[in-house]
Image (spheres, grey):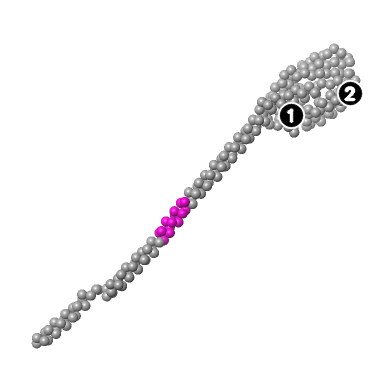
Amino acid sequence: MTITDVTGSDTAHDAAEPADQPATGGTPGQAGRDKESGGETSAAAANPEQKVAGAAGLWVRLRKNLTLLVAAVVMVAAVATVAAMYFTVYSDDQATGAATEREVLTEAKAGTTALLSYAPQTLDSDLAKGRAHLTGQFLQYYREFTDRVVKPKVQESQITTRALVSRAAVDRLSADSATVLVFLNQSTTSKEKPEAELTSSSVRIGMQREGGKWLISAFDPV
């Protein structure tokens, strides 16, 4: 009986020993490998977020550089615009400044004197001097009028006339055109009236700049 009891007790002890083993049934090495594998999986899972963060940073830098580039282009364009405006205004000021006004007045006075001064002995050259100050349709009109009316009348009546500008003022001035108001005195003699006849008149003169020279394009009594 004693042997039987001891054997049964040992058998029960041997059967109880497996209960002390790990419930998972794995070895410590396997558990470590499983842990490392889990770490690698977590790192791999974190990689997409890092890639997104990197791409976002790159986009921010690109956008900043693009903003700076656009700002630089806008600044260059603004500077170019200001420079163009400056030179345009400066050019207009130069074209309509005091020097240009004096030039216009000088040409208007000289042209008026040439148009209204002639004598029978020098008629052809006098009329040619007048035409040298004219342009456009008025030049054509003056040529036709002097050939048809002035020359025959001057030769027939021996008319001599001299014009002297007393005052002149620019009424309007732009880069290529001007209007001038001219006041003049005129002395005229003829075969019928040998005594000089003095008259005063005023004319509004239209001027055009052609080839750097101011020429008369209109001549209207006022």
Residue underneath mark 1: 214
Most frequent secondary structure within the magenta stretch: helix
How far apart are the two marked residues, 1 and 2, measured between alpha carbons? 30 Å
| Residue at the limit of the structure toward the top, as seen here | 195
Where residue 202 sits in the image (x, y, percent)? 75, 20
Q: Residue at the location (53% across, 46% down)? A: 70
Q: Can residue 211 be seen in this view?
A: yes
Question: Splitting the image into 4 quarters, where does residue 218 fall?
Answer: top right
Give, as a three-letter code, the residue at label 2: Pro
SS for dot 1: strand
**Residue holding disc 2:** 152
Give the extent of the magenta segment.
48-61
Res. 47 mark: none
Which is nearer the eye, 222 or 8?
8
Name which residue lies at 59% across and 37% down: 83
The C terminus lies in quadrant: top right
Give 183 or 56, whichever is nearer the viewer. 56
> In percent of the image, x 40 and y 61: which residue is there?
47
160 horizontally vs 169: left or right: right
Q: Check if residue 114 falls in the magenta segment.
A: no
Q: Where is residue 101 in the image (x, y as percent from the top left)?
A: 69, 26
The x and y percentages for residue 121 are 88, 21
